[in-house]
Image (cartoon, coloured by chain):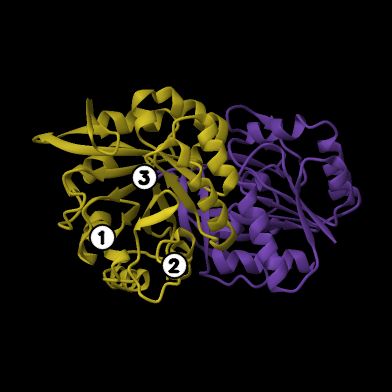
Chain colours: A purple, B yellow
Amino acid sequence: MLLTVVDYGVGNLRSIAKSIEKANSDSKLNYSIKVSSDINDIKKSDKIVLPGQGSFKACKNGINNIKGLLDELNQSVLVKKKPIYGICAGMQLFATKGYEEEETNGLNWIPGVVAKLDIGKTNFKVPHMGWNELKIENTSKVFKDVVDNNHAYFIHSYEFIPQDKNNVSITTNYGKDVVAAVSQENIFGSQFHPEKSQNTGTKILTNFLNL
Amino acid sequence: MLKNRIIPCLDVKNGRVVKGINFVDLKDAGDPVEQASIYSNGGADEICFLDITASNEKRNTIIDVVNKTAEKCFVPLTVGGGIRTIDDIRNLLLAGADKVSINTAAVKDIDFVKEASKKFGTQCMVVAVDAKKVSDGKWEIFTHGGREKTGIDAIDFSKKAEANGAGEILLTSMDKDGTKSGYDLELLNIVTKSVNIPVIASGGAGTLDHLYDAIETGGASAVLAASIFHYGKFTIKETKEYLKSKNIPVRL
């Protein structure tokens, strides 16, 4: 079994790979975990992890800059229905459009937009940075072991607002309910970093591997 | 609710901890990876390495430390000290650091912060502001580990750092650092009110009430401390339980 962490020039991929390796060995699973930008690896993969750091636009450009990557992601996820997990800006890319820097088309897998974190008239700081509590909204195979008030590590200034609230698996409160995790069929993702969220994160990654 | 973060900081020189936990049962008391693991398993919200390696040829030792830490610690890791180029940042992030803390290079040229935050995202850019009080209500920043005076106003510089892509400010009071007499609350208060990004309080922690004051009175989003944790005076858990008993939101 092969899991590929897509390397499209952003982010701290080593931590992600290491945390998945830990989930893999703790549960005695037999995945090989590969960090790669090679389309053929993604083609051969059973599962895909899409990381993301920096702006929505920069991430989308990163994907566009690797020839054939966008097509292969669409093929793997929408046609072959391979499970994919998006992290932070990687999850945000699932949206229809993002508005960071300028309006940019996303992957449009989960209809919705990514907009500047709107905390209204509160004096909260942006980025939303640190450990926040989770609240389960809809059950999901990948997030099934997460319970209300578990903590996860967030660091973001933009939020994903899916059109269909049924896609929202988890929210977190930061002056209002902010989308923390989404699910739709074989597509999963979280605004928080499972690779930095200790046991809660490991549980989620284990569930993803066990799909 | 977002929790206030407790961040232990380890000074690392030539790949070894020089100011760290003083526990006898450690296999290798100088191993930063082992110490970071203890803190992360003990409930630290982030880990900070301050690289104080002086010689250039040994500077790569921190990369190796970060590499090994990333295999064991699944909490955010910040690395500071001697970061001068885009490649320095890239190498640390590739090794597994989540954030880098920039001090001298940011003061010398704020465009460096701008360029780096464009490349790697504001989420990983911590600007370290080392401030010393020069007169009533006025602080100046110092560079080179606090040795060089710059004449630059600390509050102005914090705002400038935010405007140029800093995701967080690590604010150290040079007057309080090492004194164990508490953080500079006046300075903290002014800076936390002047910027809209999180501020980490640093310098002066000696008791748990100091941490409480930094958050409650100073408005800090996170508190960084070294000696109160290293010498076994308080564990991270005791610290958090105390803060919780005083209604500070912490992750337990």
Query: In this rendering, which labeled residue sits more in front, label 2 or label 3?
Result: 2
Assign a secondary structure to mark 3: loop
Q: Which residue is mark 2?
A: B28
* Three-letter residue code for mark 1: Leu
Which mark is nearer the camera, 1 or 2?
A: 2
Residue B9 shows up from this direction: no
Say which label, 3 or 1, has the lower sequence index.
3
| Residue B51 at x, y percent in the picture | 40, 46
How many angstroms separate mark 2 from mark 3 (CA)?
Answer: 19 Å
Toward the viewer: A62 or A32?
A32
The residue tagged 3 is: B52
Task: Report how many numbered discs are placed on residues in the image.
Answer: 3
The type of residue carrying mark 2 is Asp
Q: For the residues labelled 3 and 1, say whether their Cβ atoms are less than 8 Å apart.
A: no
Residue matched to label 1: B211
Quarter holding the C terminus of chain B is bottom left
Residue A206 locus on image (x, y percent): 70, 68
Mark 2 Cα within 10 Å, few/some/many (few <14, many 20+)? some
User: Picture coordinates of residue A126 (x, y %)?
Assistant: 44, 43
Which chain letter matches label 2? B
Same chain assignment for discs 3 and 1: yes
